[in-house]
Amino acid sequence: MSDGGGRGPGMHMLRGSAWMIALRWAIRLTGVVSTIVLARLLTPKDFGVVAIAMIVVGMFETLNLTGQGLAIIRHEDPTREHYDTAWTVTVLIGFGIAAAILIAAPLTKIYFHDERSIIVMQCLALRAIMGGFENIGTLDFRRDLKFGRVFGYNFYAKLISFVITIVAAVILRNYWALVAGILSGQFARTILSYVMHPYRPRISFAKMSEIWSFSIWTFIRSLGSYFLTQVDVIAVGGVAGASSMGRYTMAKDIASSPTFEIVTPMVSVLFPVMARYQNDPPQLRQLYLRILGWATIIGASTGVGIWLVAPDMVPLVLGSKWVDITPLIGWLALNASVATLNSGAYTTLDVIGLPHFGARLQWVRVAVLAAAMFPVAYWTHSLLTLVITRFVVTAVLVPSLLIVTGRRTGVTWRDYASALWRPFMAGVTMVLVVWPLNEILPGGPVRLVLDMVLGTLVYTGTLMALWNLSGRPVSAERDLLSLLERGQIMFGTIRARVLKAAQ
């Protein structure tokens, strides 16, 4: 893999990841600010009502994750007919999803026991229709690796949603503010897709069979991915009220977002970059190991870090009424850390033409998780026991995906160990340093800041020391060093310009 210059696949992935991470964290920053403000304006029941509605709405919206966009990105020379066919099917699916939500909404009272969620679901059905009309031409932003355009397209829509949500919360002081934010965000995305790309789609079914032969398996896997993230939420919703649902979803969001908001955009960049090298197995193997190394660094640092600082972070950021979710955040953060080991595997299987392998494995994971979670939820009615169960199941299932992907790409256990051991050892070192300190110091903002600073220094220092002792291999640590060097150069350039302008 090329590491120097700016044209190798590794550099394409690194630059694209930087843009997509910037996008996710710009969106997450507005989301964090929104959550903090809304947590003080609204109640856990308000969050719970919308969370219940979004379980059903999100379940139906997975029907739109058909993988048609991935089929076009993977195609070596797509025509207008490919784009138009994908757009036409997406529009029709959007209307179908909306109809399904409207029909199913009244039935949800039987399971979730909350009438307020019914009207919320019916209103959110409009989002599926608006989403179906998004301009298919924006796929070119990813296909051509123009991730800066992807940044603008998504961030502007989130910013509009953020403003409307906060204004509505101040005025309404109830869950309708969350509904207004969700709908306005999708409306903005659809409008911006036509403003930012000149393509104008039209109805066509010419390439239906060609696109569907690939996308059917990515659709099946996407459906499984959704249920994998919602099994625990569905289990909680069936045995607890809106208040417990609100607490659980808040804990899950706080615990997993820092990890997934970095890893997910990196993986999204991996597919278009890999698609350019789909006939070059050594490059694909190196790209997969590189993204796995990055994901493990991120997962081990953020997951363990959140577990360590949760007791001080929750009361300070969310307020005293959310303190009881602290133990949930700790276990869910560790779960997110372990789950990063799956990063890039499904994308790699898609690129090499084996999406059916990923789909089958995903549904096996859903079945095993459901078999464990629902009995635990109904027998114990304990949110803490539920999150511990999820962590154990995730840890047990991870090796199966690594084995399948490794066999199909030629990645050995030695390769996996080389990519994974340094990040995990750095995480263990961070725990050994920060945890004893927390037992000595009193809790509060000072300890929180100290934990964050010390944890970052210990983790980064240990990681880079182990990398140097390993002979400085071509890995994610080298990418990290390159980013730091580029950042230092950029800072020096900006500083010089400022000083020159001041003279």
Image: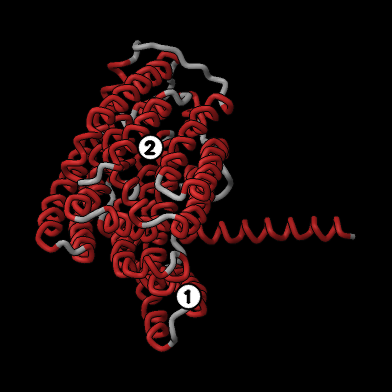
- Residue at 11 percent across and 57 percent down: it is 378
Q: Nearer the viewer, residue 110 or 86?
A: 110
x, y percent for residue 201: 47, 16
In the image, 40: left or right of 325?
right
Label at residue 448: 1
Displayed quadrant of residue 214? top left
213 to 436, vertically: above or below: above
Q: For marks 2 and 1, give the CA distance.
A: 47 Å
202 to 75, vertically: above or below: above
Q: Kindly tell me whether residue 76 is visible in this rendering.
A: yes
9 to 315, vertically: above or below: above
Count the marks: how many? Answer: 2
Nearer the N terminus, badge 2 or badge 1? 2
Contact? badges 2 and 1 (CB < 8 Å): no
- Residue at 50 percent across and 76 percent down: it is 445
Which residue appears farthest toward the bottom when viewing the image? 440
Q: Callout 2 environment at 10 Å: few (<14), some (14 to 19), or many (20+)?
A: few
Asked which secondary structure carries label 1, the reply is helix
x, y percent for residue 300: 37, 64
In the image, 363: left or right of 260?
left
Q: Nearer the viewer, residue 132 or 23?
A: 132
215 to 206, vertically: above or below: below
Displayed quadrant of residue 487? bottom right
- Residue at 56 percent across and 57 percent down: it is 483
x, y percent for residue 182: 43, 39
- Tell me the amino acid under the disc marked 2: Asp
Q: Callout 1 environment at 10 Å: few (<14), some (14 to 19), or many (20+)?
A: some
- Tell me the amino acid under the disc marked 1: Leu
x, y percent for residue 25: 50, 52
Q: Kindly tell me whether residue 474 is visible in this rendering.
A: no
Disc 2 marks which residue?
A: 280
Asked which secondary structure carries label 2, the reply is loop
